[in-house]
């Protein structure tokens, strides 16, 4: 549910809605019994009303084909309404610690900067980005690795603000970080020491 709610919505907006939603619908069976109006009331603050029908269809499929259990196999996850490659990979990684790459605009940005690749809107579908992101997943601790990658994208290697290269743990081996103007890195270091 978190991945469906996070689609095109920022995490700070999702957290309170998700917590309330999970308290009200603690399992697939409870969710499958929810009416459209109940789901609308629970999700209206997130916008994107299409999620309501999607969630109802997903819960019905989970009850009908998987006895209310979330399937572990990728093909079975992808058979569910609204489950994309990203959502299937995130569920497999975060639920079962399976080595799945998470390919979205954030991870593409980090990897593009790391390897000095041009980043475009279409880069998420680019084979080279997919190969690099897949190769970087830690096979022993994929959950921790993917959380770290997402945190790095959110807190250090940002899009809407200048990246915090001075505090980046991979700056020394990053094409973008090693080419960042020295004054911007020094300025970031000074901000850190003053704060």
Image (cartoon, helix red, strand yellow):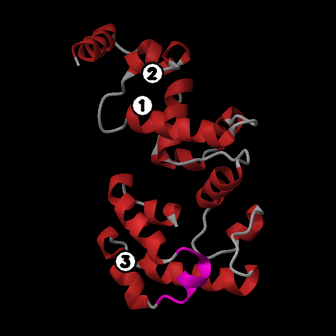
Tell me if residue 129 can be seen. no
- Vertical relation: 157 (above or below) 146: above
Q: Position of residue 138 (x, y in %)?
A: 70, 34
- Dot 3, how many residues are within 10 Å of its Cα: few (below 14), some (14-19), or many (20+)? some
**Is 48 situated above or below 159?**
below
Q: Which mark is residue 168?
A: 2
Tell me the residue that label 1 is attached to: 157
Query: Pointers 1 and 2 in contact (CB under 8 A)?
Result: yes
Quick one: 178 or 153, which is closer to the camera? 153
Nearer the observer, 115 or 167: 167
Q: Residues within 10 Å of mark 1 (few under 14, many from 20)?
A: many
Q: Residue furthest left?
A: 194
Asked whether residue 67 appears in the rendered view, the answer is yes
Is residue 68 depicted above or below 128 in this figure?
Answer: below
Q: Is disc 3 in contact with disc 2, using a CB cutoff of under 8 Å?
A: no
Count of residue discs: 3
- Quadrant of the frame with the C terminus: top left
**Residue wearing tag 3:** 42
The magenta-colored residue range is 26-34
Seen at 36% across and 27% down, the residue is 163
Does dot 3 land on a helix, a strand or a loop? helix
State yes or no: residue 93 in magenta.
no
Left/right placement of residue 102 relative to residue 2 reads right
Q: Earlier in the sequence, mark 3 or mark 2?
A: 3
């Amino acid at each position: 549910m978190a991945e469906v709610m996070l689609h095109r919505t920022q995490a700070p907006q999702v957290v309170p809605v998700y917590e309330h939603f999970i308290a009200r619908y603690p399992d697939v069976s409870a969710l499958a019994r929810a009416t459209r109006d109940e789901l609308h009331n629970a999700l209206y603050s997130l916008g994107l009303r299409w999620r309501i029908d999607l969630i109802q269809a997903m819960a019905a499929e989970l009850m009908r084909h998987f006895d209310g259990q979330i399937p572990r196999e990728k093909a079975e996850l992808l058979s569910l309404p609204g489950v994309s490659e990203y959502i299937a990979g995130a569920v497999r990684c975060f639920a079962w610690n399976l080595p799945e790459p998470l390919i979205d605009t954030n991870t593409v940005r980090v990897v593009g900067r790391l390897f000095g690749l041009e980043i475009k809107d279409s880069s998420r579908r680019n084979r080279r980005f997919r190969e690099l992101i897949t190769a970087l997943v830690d096979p022993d601790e994929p959950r921790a690795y993917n959380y770290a990658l997402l945190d790095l994208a959110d807190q250090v290697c940002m899009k809407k603000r200048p990246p915090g290269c001075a505090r980046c743990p991979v700056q020394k081996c990053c094409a973008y970080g090693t080419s960042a103007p020295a004054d911007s890195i020094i300025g970031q270091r000074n901000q850190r020491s003053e704060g």
